[in-house]
Image (tube, grey):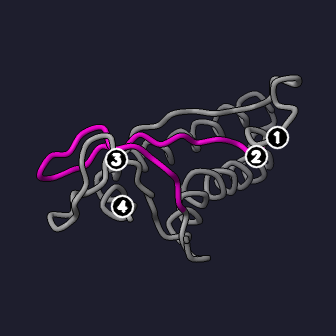
Amino acid sequence: MAKKNEITHSGKILEITPDFTTVQILVSSACASCHAKAMCGMSEEEEKVIMVPTDPYADHNVGDEVQVMTKMSMGLKAVWISYVIPLAVLMILILSLSSFIENELLTGLFSVAGVALYYFGVWLFREKLSDEFVFYIK
């Protein structure tokens, strides 16, 4: 049973190497468990493949069903990095540039360019971020 401070997904082991274990997880929205999902077509299920550091003491085999976990704080941190901070950058740029630039199109373009620069910075630090966002198998 998962603790309150953990995010868990069921998965299936695809490959095991000395460094990483590749796990396929099925991510589904809240609509996926609805009994009427076939009627409305809003169900969103997506298979994702993640790489988890291999535990040398674990007794897992290819094809085993496992629970992939991470800390809840990592999920919240990901939301901040991917959604909240870019929204704040966009709003700050729109509000500050609109007082200097009268053309709304240029204000919008510069604001979107600022968000693009933010995401480029996130991309540059992807190795550091991938070290912080760690999944584990239980």
Residue 129: x and y in percent read 37, 58
Q: Amino acid at mark 1?
A: Cys
Q: Nearer the viewer, residue 52 or 74?
A: 52
Q: Is residue 97 left or right of residue 118?
A: right
Q: Is residue 99 above or below residue 77?
A: above
Instruction: Name the element at disc 2.
Output: helix
User: Is 14 inside the magenta-drawn segment?
Assistant: yes
The 10 Å Cα crowd at callout 2, few under 14, some 14 to 19, many 20 or more, is: few
Mark 1 = which residue? 34
User: Could you say whether the residue bearing mark 1 is in a helix, strand or loop?
Assistant: loop
Which amino acid does the dot numbered 2 rest on?
Ala
Tag 4: Cα neighbours inside 10 Å, few (<14), some, or many (≥20)? many
Q: Amino acid at mark 4?
A: Ile
- Expressed as whole percent of the image width and height from the top left, the position of residue 57 reads 17, 68
Label 3: element kind: loop
Q: Is residue 33 magenta?
A: no
Disc 3 target residue = 64
Whole-angstrom CA distance, mark 3 to mark 2, is 25 Å
Image quadrant in which the N terminus is located:
bottom right
Q: Earlier in the sequence, mark 3 or mark 4?
A: 3
Give the secondary structure at mark 4: strand
Are dots 1 and 2 in contact, CB under 8 Å?
yes
Residue bearing mark 4: 137
Q: Where are the magenta residues, as a range? A: 8-30
Q: Residue at x 35, y 50 (%)?
A: 126
Q: State the quadrant of the C terminus.
A: bottom left
Identify residue for label 2.
Answer: 30
**Is tag 1's residue or tag 3's residue first in the polypeptide sequence?**
1
Real-space CA distance between mark 3 and mark 4, rounded to the nearest whole angstrom: 11 Å
